[in-house]
Image (tube, helix red, strand yellow):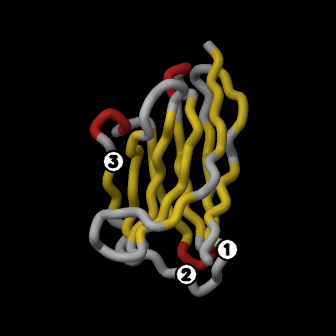
């Protein structure tokens, strides 16, 4: 069973930058795409960004364009989410996810990493 392990969250101040990482534990894991979602307190989980594993094509939520950058290192089985100019409203649990096929769904989820941004 593939496990996705996130890291890089924590406390930050508004204007700071953070880079979240997510590593798949299975060496031979080759997803179709990996992505990041987030869930703020009292809100539903929302899509942030996704990246295709082979081509590296990226897709962002319209509201996330500009400050968020998704990237991957295939040989490390790792996907990253760079967040610049953090805002208090970025406070959320950030989840990594992987989709096994091109159906647009995500089949595997990480436990999440908390990002808290103070003003």
Q: Where is residue 25 in the image (x, y as percent from the top left)?
A: 67, 74
Left or right placement of residue 71 versus residue 26 in this view? left
95, 19: nearer the viewer: 95
Secondary structure under tag 2 reads loop
Quick one: label 3 or label 2, which is nearer the N terminus? 2
Residue contact between numbered discs 1 and 2, judged by CB atoms under 8 Å: yes
Q: Which of marks 3 and 1 is in front?
A: 1
At a point 50% along the width and 24% down the height, the residue shown is 42
Q: Label 3, on which residue?
A: 60
Mark 1 is surrounded, within 10 Å at the Cα level, by few (under 14), some (14 to 19) or many (20 or more) other residues, namely: some
Q: Label 1, on which residue?
A: 25
Position of the C terminus by quadrant: top right
Q: How many marks?
A: 3
15, 24: nearer the viewer: 24
Q: How far is the residue under mark 3 from the one under mark 2? A: 23 Å
Q: Label 2, on which residue?
A: 29
Quick one: label 3 or label 1, which is nearer the N terminus? 1
Position of the N terminus by quadrant: bottom right
């Amino acid at each position: 069973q593939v496990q996705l392990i996130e890291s890089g969250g924590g406390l930050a101040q508004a204007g700071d930058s953070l880079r979240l990482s997510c590593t798949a534990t299975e060496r031979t894991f080759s997803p179709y795409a990996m992505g990041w979602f987030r869930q703020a307190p009292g809100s539903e989980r929302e899509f942030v960004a996704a990246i295709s594993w082979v081509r590296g094509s990226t897709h962002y939520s319209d509201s996330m364009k500009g400050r968020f950058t998704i990237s991957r290192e295939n040989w490390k089985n790792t996907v990253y989410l760079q967040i610049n100019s953090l805002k208090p409203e970025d406070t959320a649990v950030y989840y990594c996810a992987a989709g096994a096929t091109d159906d647009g769904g995500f089949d595997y989820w990480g436990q999440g990493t908390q990002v808290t941004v103070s003003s």
